[in-house]
Amino acid sequence: MNENKRLTFAIISHPDAGKTTITEKLLLFGGAIHAAGAVKSGKSTKKTVSDFMEMEKDRGISISTSVMGFDYRGRKVNILDTPGHADFSEDTYRTLTAVDSTLMVIDSVKGVEERTRKLCEICRMRKTPIITFINKFDREGKDPMELLDEVEAELNITVCPMSWPVGQGQNLKGVYSIYEKRLILFNAHEIQEVENSLIIDDLESDELSKRIGESNAARLREELALITEIYPEYDEELYLSGELTPVFFGSAINNFGVRELLDCFVDVAPGPGTFEAEDRMVEAVEPKFSGFIFKIHANLDPRHRDRIAFMRVVSGEFEKNKIYTHVRTGKGYKTSNPTAFMAQSRNIIDTAIPGDIIGLHDTGTFKIGDTLTEGESVQFKGIPSFAPQIFRTVVNKDPLKDKQFKKGLDQLAEEGVVQIFTKLSTKQKLIGVVGALQLEVIQHRMEHEYKSTCKFEPVDFQTACWIAAEDKSVLDRFCGDNQSKIAQDVRGQLIYLAPSKWMLDRTVEEYEGLRYFFTSDFK
Ligand code: G4P
């Protein structure tokens, strides 16, 4: 078999840092699109639920931006979209379980922001390699060293600058690529294309002073000497284990610094890796096929109930029309139209290999986390649910439609739109989501797709986590003492609904051996 050249990654960032812009530039470099404006931005915190619905209804766009593939320098690059604005949801987290590495985009004016922190934490937990792009250097932002310090301190990762900006904002003169040992000059009036970027290879040359001025040239030489002293050299092993991040500076909107980033990225980013299953590690090079579903995309058009299940191929080769085992049900599964994604088009494919993401047309067979194999009972780990941040009690407004209500909620839970919990004491249903807009989406979808009207009522706790204890008597005592605050998730695992973070910390001290988990795969 040929060496697998897939590079499957996701971009993590806080909204507005430039994810959409950089995705577009990467696709332009990869020749997958030919004009800017082709990638639809999730745009703006101002988004309303109706905008979101409109966007989702535009099925072509939202599905084809879920995975964007292109070829670059011999590698097949797959960018997995991580919903980030109003549509931030568990899908964003789960997408990170299907990639081999990530690109983290940081706004040089704002520095490390909340959403980046959270997503980076998940990457660190999973040891996913991270490459960093500090964007918007055409604006007056924070000092580059200050930014590096911030990344290192806040994200608990070693930084290794691979490029270095010359000036900033109005005075941005260029970016020196430490990786390629050359300077690329910035011309604010002309968007940089690969062909016309001005390049200076020799830092001692007169040309350098002529182009950026004697003082800038001297400063660049000085700073480069300093950063070589301060920061460690690039270490592949540390990058691959997610402990060190190579950092690039630039301005995505000006297409500046992006090619340097992409070139390094395709050199260093890992190909399809090993995935942890419950009983063993599954390696990409294994001959037998295995893959898992990490996202299910529903069609909001009520006339078409079909869905698309996104599957990451982990090992072996997936073939069209071949019968595989759907591990959860033990039944056979066959498809005649698996879909691959290339930028904005979708094509039916015959085969797929590790690193590929394929779309499977689904009429209700799949749940998030389901596995397909050639027979082995593999269950991949690390496709957890994350403790939701927003909870509500959900009440069916029309008792005659109880069946529709239950079915709707169950299906939305299968898609991963919502997590459902049942309070042990009252059997009351609770729902949990990670983004506020999801509540409205749920209401809208329940009404339009399942003809069920529901309302939400506030809850009297602030935070929740899964609980476990090696000594069962500790768990029993805890549950007994806190009966009204214990619920079960759909898998029967216990969850503690804590009135406050403070209570959470306190109870840990009171019940020795009790443990809290913020993702559901703690076993
Ligand atoms: P996101 O997907 O991470 O949310 O960010 P997006 O790319 O949509 O960028 C957010 C805003 O930042 C956009 O401006 C975009 O043009 C701008 N931007 C991206 N990269 C750069 C950069 O290198 N320099 C500067 N100065 N701005 C940048 P907007 O006004 O919200 O939208 P638009 O009207 O420009 O599209």
Image (cartoon, grey):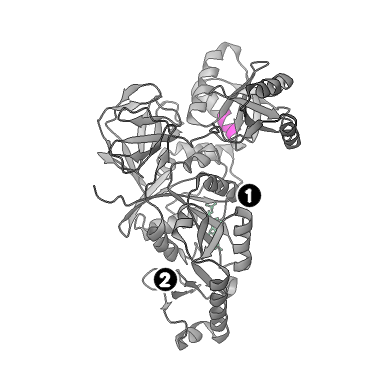
Residue 307: x %, y % from top left:
41, 30
Which corner quadrant of the image does residue 85 belong to? top right
**Label 2 CA crowd tier, 10 Å (few <14, some 14–19, many 20+):** few
Give the residues drawn in magenta, as a range. Answer: 438-443
Which corner quadrant of the image does residue 17 belong to? bottom right
Q: Give the labeled residue for mark 1.
A: 114
Disc on res. 180: 2
Viewer-closest of 112 and 297: 112
Left or right: where does residue 342 sit relative to residue 433? left
Report the Cα–Cα distance between label 1 and label 2.
32 Å
As shown in the figure, which amino acid type bears the numbered disc 1?
A: Glu
As shown in the figure, which amino acid type bears the numbered disc 2?
A: Glu
Label 1 C-beta lies within 8 Å of the nearest ligand 1 atom? no
Q: Is residue 285 magenta?
A: no
Q: Earlier in the sequence, mark 1 or mark 2?
A: 1
The residue under the point 42% across, 26% down is: 305
Residue 99: x %, y % from top left:
43, 45
